[in-house]
Image: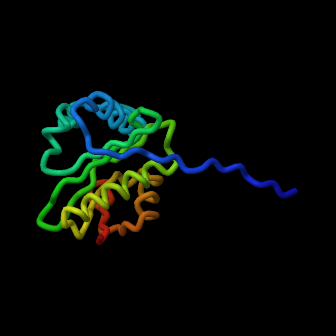
Amino acid sequence: MNRKLDLSPELRLEIRPFQPADQGSVRDLVLAGLEDHWGSLDLSLNPDLNDIAAAYAPGTFLVGRLAGEIAACGAFMPRGAHRAQIVRMSVRRENRGQGLGGQMLQALIAAARARGIREVILETTETWDEVIAFYQKHGFEITHHADGDVYFKLNI
């Protein structure tokens, strides 16, 4: 018996630069994602989240809103004249697997390209298989493994 699957259309994020009023929601989003992956949380390892505007002033920090709520975020920081590192990518638990991470990643890449960036790098924990697969699906190549992390790059 063949049945058509009723696939919902991909949700579309409203992506914009971080604003100071986003501080609490974005901090909570990132910390919840870390706790989901690690099973616990050490707040002392995340001091950049105490003042996101100041910590990411040299780079770009984007938030994605869905139905008026922040559902995703991500940032990049310059790492040389034409290189940037993507950091703090996170999607709200109940919205994972709906294409929001890909939208945020593409927005970050577009913003980096607009600033003259030609290479984007990032790292993630080597046991986070779904995260590794996500970045590979989006064209990132693994450059190396070190100290429990996987390092990627993408030429843009």
Q: Position of residue 55 (x, y in %)?
A: 15, 41
Q: Which of 32 and 11 is in front in this view?
A: 11
Taking the spot 47% from the left edge, 35% from the top edge, the residue there is 67
Left or right of 55: which side holds 104?
Answer: right
Q: Is 15 located above or below residue 122 in the figure?
A: above
Rendering quarter of residue 107: bottom left
Q: Quadrant of the N terminus?
A: bottom right
| Count of number-bearing discs | 0
Residue 54 in the figure: left or right of residue 101: left
Where is 32 relative to 121, above or below? above
x and y, in percent, of residue 92 in the image: 44, 37
Colour scheme in use: rainbow
Q: Is residue 14 above or below residue 79?
A: above
Going 37% across and 66% down the picture, which residue do you hit? 140
Occupied quadrant, residue 38: top left
- Left of 82 or right of it: where is 103? right
Q: Locate residue 13: give its quadrant.
A: top left
Name the image quarter holding the C terminus.
Answer: bottom left
Q: Nearer the viewer, residue 102 or 48?
A: 102
As drawn, the residue found furthest toward the right would be: 1
Q: Position of residue 48 (x, y in %)?
A: 18, 38
Which residue appears at 31% of the width and 55% of the height?
A: 108
Residue found 45% across the figure and 57% down from its top = 134
